[in-house]
Amino acid sequence: MSLLSQLREYELRMRREGQKPATEGAPDGETTGGMPFMYALQNVRWEVRLNIDGTLRDVLPLSSGKVKGKDKGLEITSPKVKRSGKNFKAQLFMDNAEYALGIVRKVGDPNVTQRHGAFCNLVYDCADKTALPAAVAVANFLRSHDPEKFFEDHLESVADFSPDTNVIFTVDGIRLTEIKEIQDYWAELFSASHDEELTGDKKLIVAECLITGVVGPVMNRYQLKVLLVAVRRAWHSSAPIMMPLSPMVFGHHKLLQSNLRQQLTMPMD
């Protein structure tokens, strides 16, 4: 059994024995499948409910259930990207209200239209590629969407509304982010991104995960943060093991762009 496999088994055993809450990281007992590719748990405060023809049904608040402090919304597994500066990357069918609905966060910001446009274009492309009725419904809604009127009609009177809170679209009660075809579209979008940059050819890379053994799409350049973590050996030693964790465990070399030297140090007993 590889070192990574042993660490993973140790993590799952800690959860089974109650030494670590199951809510930290992947679901308790997860062995295969797990969270979709390029997804993460995110707080979502508002649900925009649509009919299958793309007309608006209503807007509902989503709650974390907390009675103290600010309610950031319900934790939902949904598409996630890393953004910085003028990097206008949208998240699919779930994003903050500025991206998803075009509602201004900062008055006078000239980039609001570009952010909302990035969200719309992503939805349009997904609807075209998948031809799913639910995706087409959201695309139809966005094509006739008026951000100012929507805000005045549905959100202006809501005391705790903020444009930086997350919004998710549902169609006939279904979260599009949970539809397998949409998860596959999102995975292919990122798995193919680097090959397209180099050759102009979109090609989905599929490989086996060294930790779980699950076969699925992989990527050359990870869009989320590359973490440098310290873990302690679970057996007869307290010396730390230092290793960079990244989905690029399949031999890709883009990790060098992060100025990290891929190394593993572990004392030999």
Image: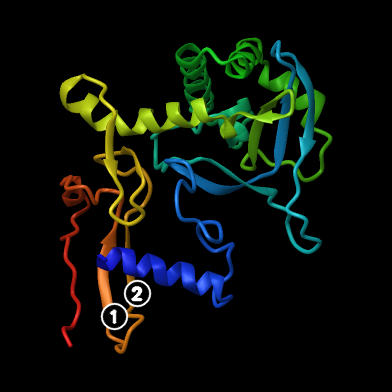
Image point (20%, 19%), residue name: 200
The reply to whether residue 110 is visible in this rendering is no
SS state under label 1: strand
Residue 199 on image: x %, y %: 16, 22
Residue 8 on image: x %, y %: 38, 65
Quadrant in which the C terminus is drawn: bottom left
Residue 123 on image: x %, y %: 52, 20
Q: Quadrant of residue 76?
A: top right
Residue 72 on image: x %, y %: 68, 51
Is the Cβ of the residue at disc 1 closer than 8 Å to that at disc 2? yes
SS state under label 2: strand
The reply to whether residue 112 is visible in this rendering is yes
Q: Which of the two residues, 230 or 250, is positioned nearer the viewer here?
A: 250
**Circle 2 residue:** 231
**Circle 1 residue:** 240
Dot 2 alpha-carbon crowd within 10 angstroms: few under 14, some 14 to 19, many 20 or more? few
Image point (36%, 46%), residue name: 214
Label ID, residue 25: none
Image point (26%, 66%), residue name: 1
Residue type at mark 2: give it: Val
Residue type at mark 1: give it: Pro
Q: Which of the two residues, 32 or 257, is positioned nearer the viewer here?
A: 32
